[in-house]
Amino acid sequence: NPTSRVTIVTPTSSKKVRVHSVMTAQAGDTTTLANWYFGSGASEVTDTTKAIAIFVSDLQDAASNNISWGTSGPLGAADEVVSIKNGASITVNWLIVYSEE
């Protein structure tokens, strides 16, 4: 179910994930949110300090969204996963560029 949290990246044991960029692209007419965040909570609002990016997308105005931080992107805690959750049950493609520290 795309409206449930999905783990996108699980770091190597004792490592932290540094996010360099994220992108989402949807294939449906429904306006929806794509929430990127650190951790396995139900959503980024569980702990707003864990938010990475929140995109609003729809086919008419913004079918794809991306943000790039380069080497100074958000850094998760050791062993913390990166999650994504969609606001509607539609097909969303995603891409993440990251490194482990």
Image: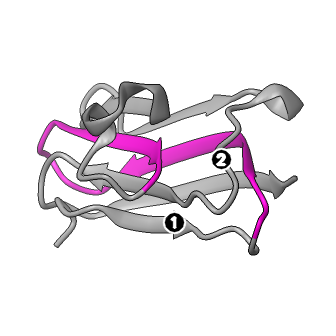
In which quadrant is the N terminus drawn?
bottom left
Badge 1 element: strand
Give the percent coordinates (x, y) of residue 87.
17, 45
Give the percent coordinates (x, y) of residue 95.
59, 56
Q: Which residues are magenta?
A: 14-39
Local crowd size for mark 1, using a 10 Å CA cut-off: few (<14), some (14–19), many (≥20): some
Whether 24 is among the magenta residues is yes
Tell which circle, 2 or 1, labels the residue nearer the N-terminal end. 1
Whether 29 is among the magenta residues is yes
Per the rendering, the mark at residue 77 is 2
What is the three-letter code of the residue carrying label 1? Ile
Q: Residue at x 75, y 53 (%)?
A: 16
For this rendering, which residue is in front, 15 or 34? 15
Q: Residue at x 61, y 70 (%)?
A: 10
Give the percent coordinates (x, y) of residue 38.
50, 47
| Mark 2 touches mark 1? (CB < 8 Å) | no
Q: Which residue is mark 1?
A: 8
What is the three-letter code of the residue carrying label 2? Ala
Local crowd size for mark 2, using a 10 Å CA cut-off: few (<14), some (14–19), many (≥20): some
Q: Residue at x 65, y 47 (%)?
A: 77
Give left or right: position of 24 versus 60: right
